[in-house]
Image (tube, helix red, strand yellow):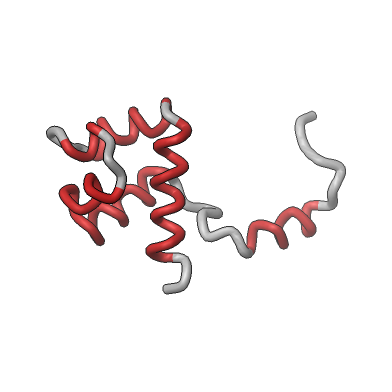
Amino acid sequence: MYGTCEPKHLRMEEQKNNPLHGKTLERILVQLVDYYGWDELGYKININSFNNNPSINSSLKFLRKTPWARQKVEELYIRTFANK
């Protein structure tokens, strides 16, 4: 079994303050695109899948394979939506 020895309620407490908890990468990306648009998103995070013929599917494929890019997207999401 993979897991921790912590009781489940303690792990849930930790997630309560995590603004990414329960959000898929697709949902995060769609919200960012809706808020900023592809041009602004590509300016804020300079990756080809945002700047050259952007699409949700191609961006998701890249982000799932590229941890540093995914981290930048998640950080922008938190800065943009965490306090709203």
Residue extending farthest to the left is: 53
Left or right? Give the position of 68 relative to 32.
right
Q: Is 73 above or below relative to 62?
A: below
Coordinates of residue 80 in the picture (x, y in percent): 38, 63
Foreground residue, 47 or 54?
47
Instruction: Write the residue at 45% across / 35% down.
Output: 68
Q: Quadrant of the N terminus?
A: top right
Q: In which quarter of the image is the C terminus?
A: bottom left
Coordinates of residue 20 in the picture (x, y in percent): 51, 54
Instruction: Write the residue at 18% across / 48% down.
Output: 38
Coordinates of residue 7 in the picture (x, y in percent): 84, 52
Q: Is 39 above or below relative to 65?
A: below
Residue extending farthest to the top is: 65
Q: Is 52 above or below relative to 15?
A: above
Instruction: Write the residue at 74% across / 53% down.
Output: 11
Residue extending farthest to the bottom is: 84
Q: Picture quarter containing residue 57?
A: top left
Foreground residue, 38 or 68?
68
Coordinates of residue 75 in the picture (x, y in percent): 45, 52
Foreground residue, 72 or 22?
72
Instruction: Write the residue at 43% across / 62% down.
Output: 79
